[in-house]
Image (tube, rainbow, N blue to C red):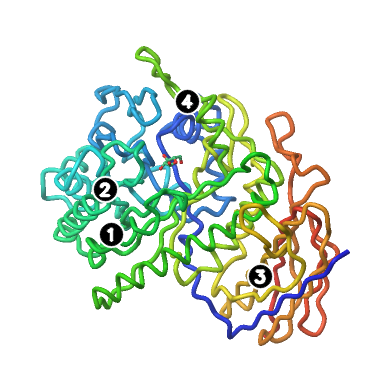
Amino acid sequence: MTAARITVSTSARVGTIDRRVFGSFVEHLGRCVYDGIFEPGHPSADGQGFREDVIALVRELGVTAVRYPGGNFVSGYRWEDGVGPKEQRPVRRDLAWHSTETNQVGLHEFAHWNAKAGSEPMLAINLGTRGELEALDLVEYTNLPTGSALSDQRAANGSEEGFGVGMWCLGNEMDGPWQLGHRDAVDYGKLASRTAKALRQLQPDLQLVVCGSSNSQMPTFGTWEREVLEQSYDDVDFISAHVYYQPVDGDVDSFLASAVDMDRFIDVVGSTIDHVKAEKRSEKQVFISFDEWNVWYQQRYETVEKIAGLGNWPKAPRLLEDVYTVTDAVVVGSLLISLLKHADRVKAASLAQLVNVIAPIMTEPGGPAWRQTIFHPFAITSRLGRGEALRAEVSGPTIRTARFGDVQAVDSVVTHDDEAGTAAVFLVNRSRTDPITVDVALHGFGALTITETATLADDDPDAANTIEDQDRVAPAANDSAAIAAGVLTITLPPVSWTAVALSIEA
Ligand code: AHR
């Protein structure tokens, strides 16, 4: 048994946790929308065809905001196709995923679903194949009070009131050569700036997200952020970051340390924001919207699943339906720790995606909906991770990784909600062989009691939840936890993620 020590103080504040960091993402991709959230024939479908069993799981997951409708999909999307009488909506070829889009779900249906799911909508604008005028039209249709052509059209289509969407993404992954309308950073930065200025003439208080890099391995990473922000800094509120992790060539130790990459990613983008802010002598603070992140076995998509062929455009194909293991859930839990550790920089984030497509929730047409392993760390962190994020200083055993060198086996963040009188400690043990007993010295909180513990671990790190065995993997109470004189002691099994909820005596 090895040991680690963590020191935390209420004065070591990183920043206030914006609830939007517990966002997710619904793209018109595979079975995320059709045969996912929307399945009119399903026994649990509501009057508009949305599955209530899925909505209940989305609520349990604690999703606070949902990005929609893409993703790569948005760069070929005409939002007008998805409004008006359903029987008149055009059927299109979606070039991003080589699928058929029926447009039976669009803006009104998404707003209906989103309200039931209890989340805030976050819409993406097509800046791949469209420009400022279509963006203006979309915002007018979505948000403006009636009295103009498009807001009146919305009312005629059944929504007198606007949808009140505050957060808008100015395109998607425009640095990626795979993106329809891909362009270089200066070109895109100028377009984003012009679009943002135009949109603010319509509605000044929008919160706008300019596209950052698609991942930290992009050859333009860093330069892209600087050049885009140099064109758009004062026009936008967020720059996006996207990342997906998978084990490469069976290197599980590096995979378990993926959060080290996420930490560095956020630090680089944060420094670049500060650099451009200084260059521009700007008073404004731009934040990071980490609006796509997850584990994704991308190799499988590239080599096995990708659809092609002139006559082959399936509807709602099974794409990107990764089945997540315990190890994947531990990585997801550690990525959540990374996001909270950067609560000063990251003010919005979206677990990509929500249902069926690299998702915490799976469904079967006509059948059940169930929780994947990654559901659990997300749901628990969203429920307990409130208030301020506090820096946790960790010292303990290290693990040698091929990709990141020596990394701490244990990583942690602590959250503190002074008003509610609660705190939570989140921990990950990346060791594949050793349980680690951790002492967490909690300074400045007053008298603490443990109210809940949850550890996700399994003798089989490859165990997963499937339609046949939907609850094979679930968190369990960690009976090793004890607290005395402000020191929490807990044993973390190998490859595990843990949360401890604490109550502070008044
Ligand atoms: O989430 C799947 C895809 O990953 C998104 O459509 C795209 O933005 C990213 O490359």
Task: Provide the secondary structure element on which disc 4 rests.
Answer: loop
In the rendered structure, are the residues bearing label 1 and label 4 in contact, judged by CB atoms less than 8 Å apart? no
Q: Earlier in the sequence, mark 3 or mark 2?
A: 2
Residue under numbered circle 1: 227
In the rendered structure, are the residues bearing label 3 and label 2 in contact, judged by CB atoms less than 8 Å apart? no
Q: Name the one closer to the observer, 475 or 260.
A: 260
Q: Nearer the viewer, mark 2 or mark 4?
A: 2
Q: Is mark 4 within 8 Å of ligand 1?
A: no
Amino acid type, residue under disc 1 in the picture: Glu
Q: Which mark is residue 306?
A: 4
| Image location of residue 466, percent across then percent down | 69, 33
Q: Earlier in the sequence, mark 1 or mark 4?
A: 1
Outermost top residue: 311
Task: Name the residue rendered at 72%, 57% in the picture.
Answer: 430
Q: Is residue 212 left or right of residue 396?
A: left
- Which image quadrant: the N terminus? bottom right
Rendered position, 421 above or below 215: below
Q: Is residue 323 left or right of residue 50?
A: right
Residue under numbered circle 2: 184
Amino acid type, residue under disc 2 in the picture: Asp
Res 118 visible: no
| Image location of residue 422, percent across then percent down | 64, 75
Residue under numbered circle 3: 424
Rendered position, 35 above or below 247: above
Q: Earlier in the sequence, mark 2 or mark 1?
A: 2
Rendered position, 436 above or below 252: below
Task: Name the residue rendered at 62%, 47% in the picture.
Answer: 375
Q: CA distance from mark 1 to mark 3?
A: 39 Å
